[in-house]
Image (spheres, helix red, strand yellow):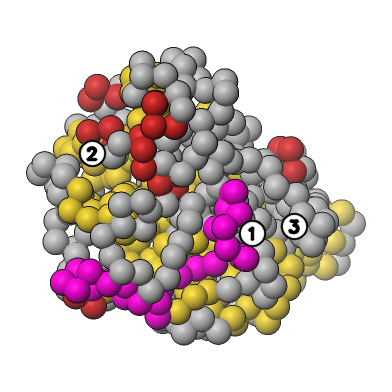
Amino acid sequence: MRGLSAVVVGAVVALAAGCSDDAPLTDPTDPPADAHAYVTRPDLTPPVMRTTVGSLPHDPSDDAAEGNVIALGPKDEDQEPAMQGALLVDPTGEPVWVSPMKVGPFDVRVQEYKGAPVLTYWEGTSTESGSGAGRVTLLDTHYRQVATVTTGGDVGAGKADIHETTITPDDTILLTAYVPARADLTAVGGPKDGWVQEGVAQEVDIATGKVLWEWRSLDHVPVAETYSSLPKDEGTQDKPFDYFHLNAVALDGDGAFLLSARNTHTVYKADRSTGKVDWHLGGKEDDFVQGAQFAWQHDIRLQDDGTLTLFDNEGSPRVGPTSRGLRLTVDEKAMTTTMVAEYLPPAARHSDTQGNVQVLPDGNVLVGWGQRPYLTEYDGGGTLIGELTFSSGSSYRAYRQTWHATPTDPPDVVVQGDAVHVSWNGATDVASWRVVTGADEASAKPVATAAKKGFETTVHASGLGAYVAVQALDADGAVLGTGTPAK
């Protein structure tokens, strides 16, 4: 781990034992659901996002410092969210790109592939036990699909789980899979010839689909390490026991891998060549003198400066008084950890499943609360700066990132009297809208211009002719695209 004699560990959102990653959790303190409605796109109903504390800082002249979009994947039909699908919003919570899906996606975010930015997300079928089977989709800056990737080898194709989609600098991707396997369950009061969900991690070449590395939990972690109780109806081939619950895989700076297992409360450092566990951080086999405990955690990340981040769910069953983000120093020589910072909600808040911690380029930290519909920004030391809520449903993770995109579809335009309504789903760089009109396209001239206001803008223009079009202009006045009313 790149200089882990002084490495910082950040908190991952911990998942509850016995709780699925998409299990419902309603709470009377969460705001009521509310959705946007648009004249130009009545098919889109993204959630209204509101500020609960402070505000998320943003300097439009320096998107790279913090990011101009926040990536989310609202889901969970039983919580009546405004929508299910992939969603990008600006730092105020205003929608930028809305992509409804029948099944809520997981891990929507911006990454890099072949030197270019891509928007990625997992899609497939998820289960009540908190796993899934599907693939990861990559979109370019015009929202065109450039690749899909899934598991391979003995695991089989189409088995990529919901939990991990990280693209590496080598244009490979880290994936997880849940595979039924025989195991001795006597340590948890079950049969000797029982069944478990084995956690499998793979590194896959995106271009070829070739599996370059694989790690299986039963080869290195016994069932006895679990904190989960064996339900009476589980441990069979039809209902394997989820003893491990692999929920994150990350590269370690010295060529090893870091793996997070919710149900063992442990982060494992695994050797790339042998798969052998070099050390356990947390759990029953903890190799460290801990400065801070965590439980049911998610989203381990080794940062560029050598710090490690994770989200501490603390449930369920509930362990600590609140979920939180953590930052720890990890000394691999002295085998000690020290808490440097914790990222606490405005008031005690348990998120039993999902969640993440993201260190931003300017040193601030964004926490996505997983099962609870919030995202919160802090300074590096843990002081809360601002928080947004999206009212209902959940999002596996939340990211604040830089994304500049121009859709291939033209802007959507609806004319109602002298009101010209316009939107362009996914366009990030529109500064203003210009209405042109005339007897036909050749004779059309500009009659009105208005600054872009949110996802949909209304421009008032009198004297409209037979031909009406709206031009999207960037900050320099260049035309990015032109839309006309649907016939």
The three-letter code of the residue at mark 2 reads His
- Is residue 336 part of the magenta span, yes or no? yes
Number of other residues with Cα within 10 Å of mark 3, as a class: few under 14, some 14 to 19, many 20 or more: many
Left-right relation of 425 to 190: right
Residue at 58 percent of width and 73 percent of height? 344
Where in the figure is residue 392, as x and y percent of width and height? 73, 52
Q: Nearer the viewer, mark 1 or mark 3?
A: 1
Picture disc at residue 301: none
**Between discs 2 and 3, the one toward the N terminus:** 2
**Identity of the residue drawn at 29% across and 24% down:** 155
249 or 62, which lies in front? 249
Q: Quadrant of the C terminus?
A: top right
Q: Which residue type does callout 3 highlight?
A: Ser
The residue at 74%/38% (across/down) is 78
Residue found at the very far left of the displayed protein: 273
Q: Nearer the viewer, residue 156 or 215?
A: 215
Q: Amino acid at mark 1?
A: His
Q: What residue sits right under mark 3 in the picture?
A: 391
Q: Write down the residue under mark 2.
A: 220
Q: CA distance from mark 1 to mark 2?
A: 31 Å
- Name the image quarter holding residue 182: top left
| Left or right of 190, for residue 348 | right
Foreground of the two, 224 or 340: 224
Task: Check disc 1 and report its element: helix, strand or loop.
Answer: loop
**Residue 308: image x %, image y %?**
33, 67
Locate the N terminus and report the quarter of the image it occupies. Answer: bottom left
Instruction: Identify residue for label 1.
Output: 350
Give the mark toward the camera: 2 or 3: 2
Looking at the image, residue 50 lies above or below residue 59: above
Label 2 close to label 3 by CB (< 8 Å): no
Q: Are marks 1 and 2 in contact (CB under 8 Å)?
A: no
Magenta highlight range: 314-340
